[in-house]
Amino acid sequence: MRAELRGNNNGRSCISVHNSTLLNTAHGSLSGALKGCLGSLDGGCIEKLLVHCGGALESHDVTLAQQVMWVLNNVASPVGDPNQRLTCWFLRALISRVSRVCPTPMNFNGSSALERRLMSLTELTRYVDLIPWHRFGFCAANTAIYKAIERYPKVHILDFSISHCMQWPTLIDALSKRPQGPPSLRITVPSFRPQVPPLLDLPTQEIGLRLAKFAHSKNIPFQFNVMDHISPNKPISIDPSSLNLQQDEALVINCQHWLRYLSNEPHENKNDNNNSCSPRDDFISATKCLNPQIVVVVDEDADTSSPSLTSRITASFNYLWIPFDALETFLLKDSMQRLEYEADIGQRIENIIGFEGCQRMERSESCGKVSERMRNGGYLSASFCEEATAEVKALLAEQANGWGMKREGDALVLTWKGHNSVFVTAWITNKRTNTCLDISQ
């Protein structure tokens, strides 16, 4: 089979196939999957094949699934265009899934076995700076937090995040320059963290010591605490007594790429009189009981929470091409930084597509669905001021062309070539509506 790359109208490359033997070498049902695709295996046709494979696995047709994977294996390339590289990781996930049902003798063209990569602080900084996936949330959230706590002499941040407190040095620096003087600052993090990239080769307490040193250099009284009672089995537990909450301090709850790692599936023994029907809802209710000054939620604007494998394939493929395409614009195909970043995304794909039940850690929801959960949990949305949008625009001006920002209701949304990628929302409680909190212009 000979294949060549050519551009299409939406910027995603496609593959021109000049050999029709694909139809003749596979099961008849495969013809339906390829109908309309021969001659131009673009992103849409690759997605169709992936969904066809997922449907075969859901119907326990392992033979058909293997035949579709054979076709995908001839399309995938770890050094190809973004669609081909993304296909490599989807194919790996599908092979991993089918291999638990039936041995798969396929010679896969993808990368080597996945490894958990531990980063140094320097490597983590480069990881966060590579594309604005995390920094967008840091920037918008910190501006909203700064406005919400500007009249308070004491601030306590309850930080639920996967980015190892990388958000806080910028806020600490801003607070040190506050006209009325800096507040005292406490940051509390849970002892439990989902085992997902980025992973840091540094214990949590050491991160706290380094933050404390930086805060003290800025003349900010600082404490760092770890909630040891939170465990991997019950990450949603929040014991108010352990937080030593004080009436004269502003409590900030920060959720950066966190909610999608809490299950959104209803409790098995759900009580119909209980409004909290899932661990994710329980977490939201638990935070509201703390009466925070502000809650900031940052996450990916995609819905990979469906119990349907084919639905997850569609949602993931149409979303995760974004980082692959963005990296293509400024990193060489053999760049180690690009390969490592894409491998981290590959780990996510393998978990989303390859596993079910408690083994599937990630269940992202769209901004609309998350916002509905927050409102159902008793929160009110707050809009971002013009200062926040200006800060984000300045950040994106430093990035590759293609990144943008838009408003959707009260949310700020990071976009790549017009496609939603990450959203930021801010929330307050009913008790806070008549206080000094006003982050809207």
Image (cartoon, rainbow, N blue to C red):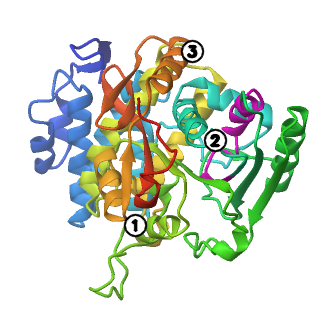
**Local SS, label 2:** loop
Assess whether mark 2 and mark 1 are in contact (beta carbons under 8 angstroms): no
Structural distance between the alpha carbons of marks 1 and 2: 47 Å
Image quadrant in which you'd find residue 193: bottom right
Is 400 contained in the magenta span? no
Residue linked to disc 2 = 151
Which residues, given as a range, are shown in magenta?
156-177
Query: In this view of the protein, can residue 19 be seen by the observer?
Result: yes
Q: Nearer the viewer, residue 152 or 390?
A: 152
As helix, strand or loop, the secondary structure at mark 1 comes to: loop
Q: Report the mark closest to the observer, 1 or 2.
A: 2
What residue lies at 15% left-to-right and 29% top-to-bottom?
Answer: 37
Q: Is residue 33 above or below residue 218?
A: below
Q: Which residue is mark 1?
A: 356
- Left or right: 109 in relation to 380: right
Q: Residue at x 36, y 63 (%)?
A: 378
Q: Residues within 10 Å of mark 3 (few under 14, many from 20)?
A: few
Q: Between marks 1 and 3, how big is the CA–CA gap?
A: 35 Å
Residue 102: x %, y % from top left? 38, 66
Closer to the chain start, of discs 1 and 2, is 2
- Earlier in the chain: of badge 2 and badge 3, it is 2
Residue shown at 30% from the left, 22% from the top: 418
Tell me if mark 1 has few (under 14), some (14-19) or many (20+) residues whose alpha carbon lies within 10 angstroms of its own. Answer: some
Label 1 with label 3: CB-CB less than 8 Å:
no
- What's the mark number on residue 332? 3
